[in-house]
Amino acid sequence: MNLESKVAIVTGAAGCIGSTTAKRLASDGAAVVVCDVNLELAQNVADAIIADGGRATAIETDVTSTESIDAMVAQTIDQHGRIDILVTAAGGSARERASTVHGSSVEVIKQVLDVNLRGAIFCCRAVVGQMIAQEAGKIVNVASIVALQGSPGHADYAAAKAGVIAFSKTLALEVAPHNINVNCVSPGLVPRPGTRVDHIPATNYLGRVATPDTVSNLVAFLVSDEADFVVGQNYVVDGGRSLGLKGRR
């Protein structure tokens, strides 16, 4: 994909999907603003992009804070003068503290909703003004197949990601007249480093494990000129897992 002259913001860019997406967009020519709450890890990603000949800047960004988001967007505009692409990859399911609804703590529920749903909403809110002024822009919000089929112990995460999908469709309706494309990507299980993966091939119809590239390849298409007529869609990337009928969930 040709993203020369484009400026891209990727949140959660120190994470598995986020870092791979940031590197992919940079390899396609975009200047990437690498955003994460962990500045050291974000800088590592930016340094790797620069070492490969790309353009990147790391900015510490807490997506649960509107002040932090607004500061990041202002810095991006000040440095680059425009924002062409936003990918909201910041998120997480609090797997280590997963619990049934009646056993969940208020703290964990609020954290999951804040990072996954409010973070996506407020990041989009912060950039659309600039995109409207430009009369151009591409936004991809990262959701999850859990939003479509549920997952015991992750009701808060499922609700948040379902909200991301609904929000993306509504935002798409609002900003499409300004030549802004908003879409959503819902990955299946993309293992983190160190995660046990031997059971995963049996849960999807392709019989293999997804990689972060599985998601970043689709994101790269959706933010490119080739996807100019794609609006308000949710793309499931899970090897058929969400179809059910096979294997364990």
Image (spheres, rainbow, N blue to C red):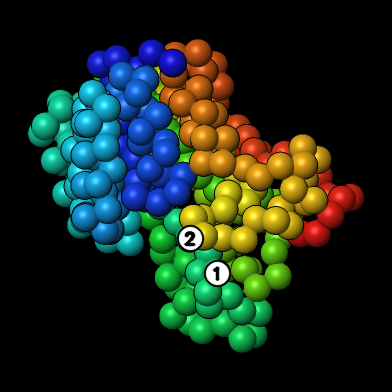
Left-right relation of 32 to 175? left
Query: Residue at coordinates 34% horizontally, 40% vertically from top-left?
Result: 10
Left-right relation of 11 to 39? right
Instruction: Give neighbour class at mark 2: few <14, some 14-19, many 20+ (Cα, 10 Å).
Output: some
Q: Secondary structure at mark 2?
A: loop
Q: Position of residue 248 (x, y in %)?
A: 80, 59
CA separation in Å, label 1 and label 2 = 8 Å
- Label 1 sits on what residue type? Arg
Left-right relation of 29 to 149? left
**6 and 126: which is toward the camera:** 6
Question: Which residue is outermost to the left?
Answer: 78
Q: Is residue 66 visible?
A: no
Query: Residue at coordinates 27% horizontally, 27% vertically from top-left?
Result: 52
Q: Position of residue 67 (x, y in %)?
A: 20, 57
Instruction: Give neighbour class at mark 1: few <14, some 14-19, many 20+ (Cα, 10 Å).
Output: few
- The label on residue 134 is none
Residue hosting label 1:
95
Callouts 1 and 2 close, C-beta under 8 Å: yes
Q: Position of residue 160 (x, y in %)?
A: 54, 59
Q: Secondary structure at mark 1?
A: helix
Query: Residue at coordinates 54% horizontally, 29% vertically from top-left?
Result: 218
- Label 2 sits on what residue type? Gly
- The label on residue 92 is 2
What is the quadrant of the N terminus in the image? Answer: top left
**193 and 187: which is toward the camera:** 193
What is the quadrant of the C terminus in the image? Answer: bottom right
Q: Position of residue 231 (x, y in %)?
A: 55, 26
153 above or below 186? below
Left-right relation of 148 to 160? right
